[in-house]
Amino acid sequence: MRTWRLAGIVLAAFVLVTSACAGQGQESATNTSPVTGAFDWKRFSGQEITLLLNEHPWTDGVQPLIPEFEKLTGIKVNVQTFSEDLYFDKMEQALRSSSPVADVYFLPMDSTGYTQYQAGLIAPLSPYIDNPSLTASDYDISDFPEGFISVVKYPPGAAETQIYGIPITFETYILFYNKELVDRYLGGQVPQTMSELVADAQKITDEANGEVYGAVMRGIRSDTIMDTLTGVVFDSWGSDPTPLPYNIWFDGAWSKPRLTDPRIVEGLSNYAALVAAGPPNALSLDWPDATTLFQQGKAAFFIDASLFAPAMEDPSQSQIAGKVGYAMLPSTNQGAMTGHWMWGLGIPANSEHKEAAWYFIQWATNKENTAKIGVHTWGAPRTSAFSDPVYTDALVPEYVDAVSTAMATSRPTAVMKEGWKEGALVIVNAMQQMAQGKNPQEVMAAAQAQFEQLFG
């Protein structure tokens, strides 16, 4: 979830300051592989690699499988796992160490990864992916949606790029709904458009007199809500490109913010209206609060990360297990779109065993293991996983349909810009003002002026 990455944002700023010392993207120019001949899983037998992993359901899923990798390849694997609050510090220390610490690491596939690339701290994977001597013929990089891979193609927006990470788990932003409350207040009719969702959420809040609420959303003033918020804005944006590094908020240059674009205004207004349909303290809710309220059956609708679904279906955590519906974000006049955030695997530039590290990454992220490990995360990032019974039989069918539909058109929510936290807070402030009843066009005109000062 976005809350995991707050420390990473702070560290990213530090990396940007020091990147001039390391040299931008140095590894992309120097990392080529001379390996030729037939692909052979035993090619690097006898080598030893270290994995630097975050405590995460993906880590829980992969660890029991590692002996299979060691037997297949003859490569010895050491695992170092750290809790979320420690992981980002350990990651940065490992990448910046003068001597090798790790060979594979949990890569945040957002601006954190980009700043690591700028500082020359991460190795490109394209030389291995493109070499049939180092990548099995059935690996199939195209099985990952292009929207998932695009966020780790550096330099972003360039004519020629290289891939720097492979997705291992993702969250996309979908609609959760309480079936019992939809039956009680809406006659069982799930809203099909965003305007219907906004109206229905307010209707439930008005009629329930504080017993339940129409919606519960992240409303807190924090840049950590931006991924979910951006996913809702994408729904109003439609199919027009949102190229990195600028994403939706700039028109191809940092000096050209476009916060007054009617689609952006509409998307933020929709998000704000759903926040306003929540409890009296809606503007102080973060994801733990919103999730808990929804699990307690206190809200009819909830838009947030798909990876909350396992907790919704766990009777030990959720009072509405088995009563939750899942859907793609309701459509707007522009169609139905959403966004995503991902963890991936990368190779530190200072690794001395890059080829062996790539063998682990391709094995852990192949079709078979993506499906197996995805059972633990509910976020398998390969398209093929959504037709693999190993994966789909472990999930709720409605969830499978919603997420497979979402991932086909989902796009990254990242903005790759130093100082972006300030810009994100301008947007969050604007959303909060709309939720309090202020005119959306006036609010966004003021936000546009602030962006021009910040980034112009």
Image: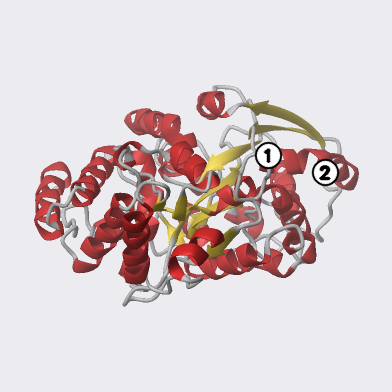
Q: Where is residue 117 in the image (x, y as percent from the top left)?
A: 45, 42
**Please, what secondary structure does the residue beneath circle 1 have?**
loop
For disc 1, the marked residue is 316
Classify 10 Å Cα crowding around label 2: few (below 14), some (14-19), many (20 and above): some
Inter-mark Cα distance, 1 to 2:
27 Å
**Please, what secondary structure does the residue beneath circle 2 have?**
helix
- The image shows residue 210, relative to residue 82, as above or below, that is below
Which amino acid, by three-letter code, is at mark 1? Answer: Ser
- The image shows residue 107, relative to residue 90, as above or below, that is below
Please indicate whether residue 364 sits to the left or right of residue 288 in the image: right
Residue at point 24% right, 64% down?
266
Residue at point 30% right, 44% down?
417
Please indicate whether residue 437 sits to the left or right of residue 146 in the image: left
For disc 2, the marked residue is 65
- Can residue 305 be seen? yes
Q: Residue placed farthest to the right in the image?
A: 71
